[in-house]
Image (tube, rainbow, N blue to C red):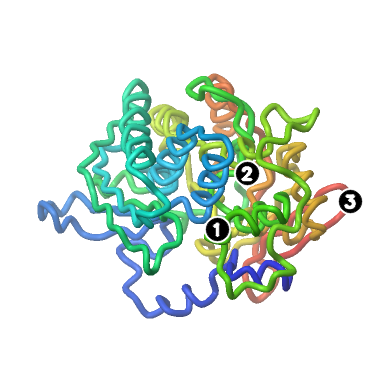
Amino acid sequence: MSDKYLQRGVSAAKEEVHAAIKNLDKGLFPQAFCKIHPDYLAGDKDFVNVMSSDGSGTKSIIAYLYWKETGDASVWRGIAQDVIVMNLDDLLCVGATGPFVYNSIINRNKHKIPGEVLKEIIEGTASFFEMLQKYEINCHFLGGETADLGDITQTMTTDGTMTTRMLQKNIINNGNIQAGQVIVGLASYGQAIYENEYNSGIGSNGLTSARHDLLSKKYATLYPESFDSNTNQNVLYCGKYSVTDQLPNLPLNIGKMLLSPTRTFSPVIKNILNNCGDKIRGLVHCTGGGQTKVLHYIQNVDIVKNNLLPISDFFQLIKNESNVSWQEMYKVYNCGTKFELYTDETTASEVIQIANSFGIDAQIIGYTSTQKESKPRVIIQNNGEEIVY
């Protein structure tokens, strides 16, 4: 990882976090994407409880900048979606399709974040759940906590927790990822039939780097509350763009590209699980860690990605402006391939057809092979370059 990335106080691999939790109980299925518990809520031995807690990260700072520059408070609705999807799509990865219950947590600096912003987030949460209901994804908003913590929060953080009960027999356990399978990748970019506009595919990971590498130094002067004052000035807002700048090859301005709400694949995955769920051996949401995310869940197998979906112009722009290697790009960003399914070739064709019916690009992006070294590896082959993690 580059010094610049680490100097900004972030880590794609979160080594310290994983070290801190290494001795915690791993749940009933240690290799599952989410921690799975016995059914503490109802005591039914056939059921399990699954929970996820996550948030939008520093993406809320970009919403803050855009809102301050344009007065457009509606961008905060996308932040509401980011928080939900970072939880919902993680739960999908163990085969959970609901019903779900959701609780939101907002910490704000009241001097910077007024009630109109809170209103947009709450209404954005409700409207997103209404959209999901049309695709039989039932999420129930149980409220949450909004705390005024100006002494420790410079702008606002947005987080949430989602949980469900499900039949244990329906669990998808990534421990079943084995050699001889193919990997289907679903695109993060484009416009799905349930989205209102083009999605850049950025999701909610890598936004600290993307923000500072793309946006102009003027934001450091205008909005000192948007960064940690302890950060080296040389890595703050190193770019040349304003949030309202429009580039000819991008469908949206720079700010809106950075703020594209994290795409949910829940309508797609529910359809796939209903039609061929017994053939799906693993599911991975490529969030923190990007294309290396799967390394947390596999044993005795190598992952070879030799046909990733095309790199969009926006991810190429981030790479060019950041001046980082592809090795770092694939670990920080999803780079266009945001969801992975592990299955056989016949089922892969059906999965691709279902994804396409929702307006989402999909293709076989690679395969699994027998582990050849002491630890599992992810091997990315792209444009004549081989990158090994």
Is residue 37 visible to us here? yes
Asked if the residues shown at circle 3 and circle 1 are in contact, with their CB atoms under 8 angstroms apart, the answer is: no
* Mark whose residue sits in front, 3 or 1: 1
User: Which of pointers 1 and 2 lies earlier in the amino acid sequence?
Assistant: 2
The residue tagged 1 is 226
Percent position (x, y) of residue 249? Answer: 79, 29
Spatial separation of the CA atoms under disc 3 and disc 1: 40 Å
Residue at x 59%, y 64% (from the top left corner): 12
The residue that label 2 is drawn on is 182
Foreground pick, 28 / 301: 28
Inspect the image, locate mark 3, and give the three-letter code of the amino acid beneath it.
Gly
Amino acid at circle 2? Val
Mark 3 nearby-residue class (10 Å; few <14, some 14–19, many ≥20): few
Residue located at (34% from left, 28% from top) = 127
Tell me residue 210's x, y (percent).
67, 52
* Residue 47 - label: none
**Residue type marked 1:** Ser
SS class of the residue under badge 2? Answer: strand
Q: Residue 319: x and y, percent? A: 78, 51
- Could you say which quadrant of the image residue 322 lies in? bottom right
Mark 2 or 3, which is nearer the eye?
A: 3
Identify the residue at horizontal 47%, vertical 79% (top origin): 19
**Element class at badge 1:** helix
Q: Who comes first in sequence, dot 3 or dot 1?
A: 1
Q: Quadrant of the C terminus?
A: bottom right
Q: Which residue is mark 3?
A: 384
Q: Secondary structure at mark 3?
A: loop
Left or right: where 323 falls relative to 389: right
How many numbered callouts?
A: 3
Q: Please say if 101 is above or below 36.
A: above
